[in-house]
Image (cartoon, rainbow, N blue to C red):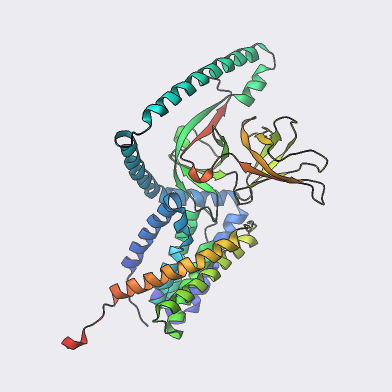
Amino acid sequence: MNETIRNSEVVLLLAATAVAEIVFANYFPAALYLDLSLVLALYIGWNSSPAKGAVRGFTFGLLKDAISGIYLGLNGLSKTLMGFGGSYLSKWLVLEGFPARCVLIGLLSVLDDGIVVGMGALLGQTIQREMWLRTLIQAPVTGVAGGLVFHVYDRFKFPQKDFRRL
Amino acid sequence: MIELLQRKSLVPLAVLLLANILLLSVQVRNEEGRLLLRSWSLVLFTPIASSLHFLVAGVTHGLNRYVLLYGAQEENLQLRAENAHLGVELAQLRGIQSLLSIREDGPMFQDQFLFDTVLAQVIWKSPPFYAHRLVINAGTRQGIQKNDAVITPQGIVGRVWATTPFTAEVELITNDGAAAGAMLEDSRLQGVVQGDGSVILQWDFIPNYESVEVGDIVYTSGTDRMYPKGFPIGQVVASQKKGTVYRDIQVEPFVDYLRLEEIMVVVSKGGGIE
């Protein structure tokens, strides 16, 4: 199992996500089309065991619920599944290409949104009319941004080795 | 613990999913439990939001006060003129107040129109995709309580949803499930304005045979015992007969909730005009 994310790193990423989500919500509402919690839950899940991926996804989800002002547990549930699924996908899929990663993250963004909205509807929340439009915009934005985060973080975590010097 | 559980990776997943579902069920079934959880999350994130607000407000105020002074003189003249008009209106209201105080039933009317407010600044807004809520930098120490009305001079904003000693969470009238008693200015026709999570409000319980035109102004009726009577809510943007008993009426609020910076919380009624 490829265990490369330390707990201290996760705590730092949680803090950074909290600050970013609050800044986005208050000063750059357009940036909310990027589901940063999902991207990080997926990345951490991708580089963790399924159990750790689920636990870490759960914490990112609860953070997003607390900041969003919705029922605590809606994103908690979806991000738990995303963190867990991310870990399994890393074993089944070899996604080194940037476009492939973007497409996968975009599709998972749609699935994640579907879980949150579906659970919300089960709990009596109204499904907003513009929900579909938001999901359609959010999927490619999150997909591309997620691809970039994966790429940059991978370069940072696994710097390319110069084999000519060996 | 994680190391122990990861031998069977489906076990922690099941535990976490169950925890999420339990968490959700506690919030949905128990109103008090939901507020408690929201208050905890408020306490947790308020320092971050307050710090950011302090930083941004400091930079913005510094720029506006010392650098970006273009147009300040015109604005000053405009404010003086507005101040003069408000002085006249205040004198008129004092006259009405004195008239009401003479009548036997005067105090009943005073309770509807006169109230004390606490001015507060918005320090944090929820992402509008999910919930229409915001957090203000005033709480129970300033006399704010749950279900206090939140207003601006342009119209109503919502109600206090949860409180901490120094902050309060406000549910906007556009939030799914939020509602207020409403009436038309001219015909005094009364109904209930409700939010559904979009930026447009629904005005319910208006019979099909009643006439409501696009452009009509909707005010609070005071029947909900929460919002002060006669405060503007919004303007009718669509009104048509439905197959059912009631009309389908949509109201666009006067308050731009995305750009709210300062609001007033109605902390008590019958305070009088100082």
Q: Is residue B8 above or below residue B234?
A: below
Name the residue at the left extreme.
A165
Instruction: State the residue at coordinates (69%, 17%).
Output: B105
Front residue of this view, candidates A66 and B175: B175
Where, by quadrant of the figure, is residue B213 drawn? top right
Where, by quadrant of the figure, is residue A74 drawn? bottom right
Return the x and y of residue B171 as percentages of the image width and height: 56, 45
Answer left or right for A9 relative to A87: left
Return the x and y of residue B225 as percentages of the image width and height: 65, 33
Return the x and y of residue B147 as percentages of the image width and height: 58, 39
Q: From this viewpoint, is residue B155 visible?
A: yes
Front residue of this view, candidates B196 and B222: B196
Return the x and y of residue B71 as percentages of the image width and height: 38, 32
Instruction: State the residue at coordinates (77%, 41%).
Output: B206
Q: Is residue B240 above or below residue A93?
A: above
How many marks are shown on the rendered structure? 0
Front residue of this view, candidates B160 and B203: B203
Answer left or right for B191 relative to A107: right
Where, by quadrant of the figure, is residue B216 drawn? top right
Instruction: State the residue at coordinates (44%, 22%).
Output: B80
Question: Dividing the image into 4 quarters, which one contains the N terminus of chain B?
Answer: bottom left
Instruction: State the residue at coordinates (45%, 47%).
Output: B124
Q: From this viewpoint, is residue A41 visible?
A: no
Name the residue at the top extreme.
B102
